[in-house]
Image (tube, rainbow, N blue to C red):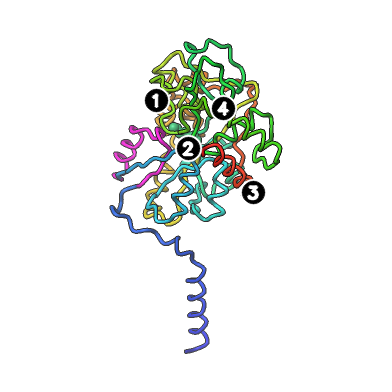
Amino acid sequence: MSVKKRLAAALLAATALLTPLAAKPAQAADPGVLHIYNWTDYTSPDLIAKFTKETGIKVTIDTYDSNETLLAKLKAGGSGYDIVIVSNDFVPIFISQKLIQPVDAASLPNFKNLDPKWQARDWDPKAEYTVPWQWGTTSFAYDTKVYPGPVDSLATLFKPPAEFGNNVGMFGSPSEVISLALLYMGKPQCNTNPADLKALVALLQAQKPHVKVYNSDADSDRLISGETTISEIWSGDAFRARSQHPSLKYVYAKEGAIAWMDNLAVPVGAPDAENAKKFLNFMMDPQNAALETNFAGYANAVPGSSAYVTPALASAPEFNPPKDLKMVFATSCPAKATKDYDRVWTLIRQ
Ligand code: N2P
């Protein structure tokens, strides 16, 4: 073998070693069909129908309840999903664990439609991996017929007045419950301070007898049916719930609210990354972004979509956080804090 040939062979072998196995696209059971994995009640059927009509690409949707569930699913490998939706605080984790692949969102034709402030996001400054999906706030809603109020504090959720009985709803994931509890306590996010964690456990333990369910799925359905009369909830779900149960009220507490943005991403090994990118581009069209916003009740990153947002949503309190609200953006926690959170969660859930 000539030196040149040997060099080329060695290079080839080295490249093969460098290429992560997971980067090989999984074989889709149904090629050409786009497999989306999204949060529950978070994908507009009209949006999907429009995408299929315009592109001929069929879509399947599976759902999950939390970033933790999504993380576990992608870590297990071979999910077969082409698109997932990751909250801002989890994006750095998905990138560093090589669970989502570069998509060069900035090169997609509709990227220019994004509000410049959402083009460069802290968790993906060059838009290499993600496209904004929706953003909103996390707080709680309660039934004003059960408890007239006034309510101006997260204390009403964490130390519920007797009127709520044991009908409190809380989310089912450590990140969502602990971030709001720490906000109520006036303590830093991603907290590893032993005294703070002790107080956190005490707070959640004392609340627990009043909690009917820890579950992030169908939170609005339970408020609508009256199964819960007060519940941790995201702003859009609160809007949807109030539309069917007008005595519900979403609270902007004096301690503040957690704000977040969810982002479209393409898993490493996605069977159909090219069609996934078509969907990413599709979502940055103003009318399409509005379709999703009108369905789920959350803001998007495409200013041109405002013209298509329904008046009921555009004027809704859940959609318009007060100017003076203390918004704490969901914080990406280092591994040590996540471990502590898991310990707290195990204690609460056992
Ligand atoms: C809607 C899901 C909202 C996701 N049910 C919040 N990150």
Give the mark nearest the N terminus, 1 or 4.
4
- Indicate the secondary structure of the residue bearing disc 2: strand
Q: Which residue is mark 1?
A: 221
Crowding at dot 1, Cα within 10 Å, few <14 / some 14-19 / many 20+, comes out as some
Which is more N-terminal, label 2 or label 4? 2
Mark 2 vs mark 3, foreground winner is 3
Which contiguous range is marked in magenta? 35-57
Helix, strand or loop at mark 3? helix
Mark 1 or 4: the one toward you: 4
Q: Please tell me how crowded label 3 is: few (under 14), some (14-19), or many (20+) other residues with Cα within 10 Å.
A: few
Which residue occupies the foreground of this view, 261 or 219?
219
On screen, 201 above or below 124?
Answer: above
The type of residue carrying mark 4 is Gln
Mark 4 highlights which residue?
Answer: 207
- Point 29% across, 54% down: residue: 29
Check contact, mark 1 vs mark 4: CB within 8 A. Answer: no
Distance, label 2 to label 3, CA atoms, is 29 Å
Q: Earlier in the sequence, mark 3 or mark 1?
A: 1
**Comparing marks 2 and 1, which lies closer to the viewer?**
1
Above or below, 61 against 142 in this view is below
Q: Which mark is residue 133?
A: 2
Badges 3 and 1: C-beta atoms under 8 Å apart?
no
